[in-house]
Amino acid sequence: MAQYSRISGSVGLITLKNPPVNALSAAVRQGIVDTVEKALCDPQVKSVVICGQDGVFCGGADVKEFEKSMSGPPLIPMIHSIECATKPMVAAIEGSALGGGLELALGCHYRIAHSKARLGLPEVTLGLLPAAGGSQRLPRLIGVPAALDLITTGRHVTAAEALQLGIVDQVTDHKTVDAAVKFALSVAGKPLDARRISTYPCPVVTDLDALFEDVMQKVRQSARGAIAPIACVQAVRAAATLPYTRGMEREKELMATLFTSGQARALQYNFFAQRAVGKWRMPSGARWDTSTPRPVHKVAVIGLGTMGRGIAVALAQAGLPVVTVEAQEKQLMEAKRVMSDMLKRGAKRRGVAPPLDKISYSSNIQDLADVDLVIEAVFEDMDLKKKVFLQLSAVCKPGTLLCTNTSGLDVDQLASQTRNPELVVGMHFFAPAHVMKLLEVVYGPRSSPQAVATAMQLGKKMGKISVAVGNCRGFVGNRMLKLYTEQASFLLEEGATPDLVDRAIEEFGFPMGVFRMSDLSGLDIGWRVRKEMKLAVPGQSARIREGRRYSPLGDLLCEQGRFGQKTGRGWYRYNKPGDRVAHSDPWLHHFLEEYRAQHGLVARRIDQQEILERCLYPMINEGFRILQDGIAAGPEDIDVIYVFGYGWPRHCGGPMFYASMVGLEKVLERLEHYYQAHPDVPYLQPCSLLRRLVAIGSPPVQKWREVIKNLHSQL
Ligand SMILES: CCC/C=C/C(=O)SCCNC(=O)CCNC(=O)[C@H](O)C(C)(C)COP(=O)([O-])OP(=O)([O-])OC[C@H]1O[C@@H](n2cnc3c(N)ncnc32)[C@H](O)[C@@H]1OP(=O)([O-])[O-]
């Protein structure tokens, strides 16, 4: 809807009304068409201001409408008629002007923004392009290079940057609508020909071909198979080379391809999935909207290794006072130096003062007596963590929330060391913790809803996408990842090479293949865990352990001191320890040949399809088990974890969405096939939830929660 009124005698005020973000639904578009007509027909009105209610200009097209057949007035002619209006049209931008919202503002003759407003064309992140004239107007307004940057990345700019770029005409710290009305009064009656962006020639670029070639190359590299960024470049090229009307035709043509693509569906699903995970629920019935978080004014981080440092920096950057505790004096001093540098670098990037005074450093655990929440980030060792929790339980004031940063240890075992197990949750950060967006908040059987709500809220404050998950070995992310890495090793035994497997995975869209990633994080980490579990036994190369197939390849490399990048040797060869460029290693290929010969394995040709199916489908199958076990509340949780924590290509939605795109029947059939071929790998056996979904006709991923709920209620 849009509301019309007349203020200050001669200014027509149009207010978009569609909470929470005033998205351009059919009703809003109709409202705009009607109210613009009213304002233009009103002889008292000399100029018009368009604003949004409740401090938000407009969040763009209503993404929920994309799945339905379009009704209501289309955006392009609506914006065109605003631009053609004979009375000055002024956009009063508060909050956000994004996508179609900014395109609407670009159709206006003037734009006034509040200093806290954010503007952008984020369509590319939804698998689309700014197809309501944005790809044609923005380059004409701010030039091709700046428009390419904004349109291909979808990044939001501040009002200050928008002013600098020339997107807005004025920025105000006061009431935006008042400023816009004052402005509208000042421009009433002035000629408008020079204010219609579509009539501007596109600013000339010297060596246009070289610019576009360069941008296209960069976009192809970073897009990793995503088609929307490429279409965005093509649309801007049309703006730079064609008259406006022909450019608009090209924009429409490109949009038609994107709009119906699987990638757009995946990205839009992911947009809503990111919001769905905030509405967490626990199997007990506790939920986000019925659980009140405890206030957190002061936080502590104990253990200043790589993870602890990143967590403390992220907390300080979120404005929270942090007490850090590290028992070893030397490590404490080193951490202080490194963290100060991290804070300074981050502040420089964001153009703010470094929050150095937010962090205090101590080697005495007694200093944690008055904090509201502790994040324990000591070495990943259960006995050590238990000892720390016992101490924390004695030192901290009653009611302090105790969180463990662990990538997979049993949160409930740690809780049992404390007086108040209901105040214990896991907070699984991803390295580097001040950069990575994902946080798994792990609740044990005794964690209270309030503790979960507090950790989720803290994650949000730190700018993380937090997902609440149940307690099991590896939680969601690492539980699934284990099968992926194991299958990759099996493929090496059967004839593949690390290069071959990684190429297939990277072509699928992961930023890094499984072996390159293993070299980066260090092979010794998994080796230590396997040794603790008595799975890896030095000197042993048996391929069946604990009654199932086991690949000792990683262990054998570790026994040779090949820990990955840090030792200059791993699955690949590096020019020197610490180097990042992986080279194919003839030594490793020879080692694999010898290994196969020793075990009587005959190498066979393995194609890309098999690599993807073998690495991804077992993970997906485990995802179904996780849903069935109630460890994750819905497929969205798993998909968000994989996209934001493990580099799953966002344009493929996440593993569970991908499974629905491939077809559950096909996933089931391939798993059955691989299980038959490898009966000594029990997890290849298709999960009963997957079978159930296929049996009821493979409903879309958005319907799985219902099926899972029914399944649980039958148990
Ligand atoms: C021809 C086509 C050309 C144009 C294409 C486009 O414009 S494409 C669009 C280009 N635009 C974009 O890509 C902008 C997308 N939006 C955003 O980036 C952010 O929402 C925000 C910055 C506007 C507000 O952030 P915030 O943290 O304050 O709030 P929040 O993020 O938590 O959202 C609150 C609620 O609003 C919902 N919702 C939000 N936007 C839309 C929408 N467009 N539609 C529908 N719904 C939308 C959201 O799902 C959530 O619903 P829930 O869970 O409560 O039921």
Image: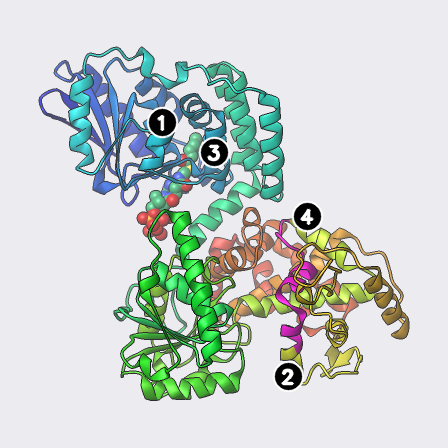
Mark 4: amino acid = Glu
Residue at disc 3, CB closer than 8 Å to ligand 1: no
464 in relation to 553, above or below: above
Q: Of label 1 and label 4, which has the lower sequence position?
A: 1
226 in relation to 91, above or below: below
SS category of the residue bearing label 3: helix
Camera sees residue 197: yes
Q: Of label 1 and label 3, which has the lower sequence position?
A: 3
Per the image, is 517 magenta?
A: yes
On the picture, is 429 further left or further right than 284?
A: right
Q: Provide the residue designation for mark 4.
A: 507
Q: CA distance from mark 1 to mark 2?
A: 61 Å
Q: Provide the residue designation for mark 3.
A: 151
Q: State which image quarter holds ligand 1.
A: top left
Q: Of label 1 and label 2, which has the lower sequence position?
A: 1
The front one of 598 and 573 is 573
Mark 1: amino acid = Gly
Asked if the residues shown at circle 1 and circle 2 are in contact, with their CB atoms under 8 angstroms apart, the answer is no
Count the marks: how many?
Answer: 4
Q: CA distance from mark 4 to mark 2?
A: 34 Å
Label 2 Cα crowd, 10 Å radius (few <14 / some 14-19 / many 20+): few
Residue shown at 30%/33% (left/top)? 27
Per the image, is 630 magenta?
A: no
Tell me, for residue 533, which label it has, or none: 2
Q: Of label 4 and label 3, which has the lower sequence position?
A: 3
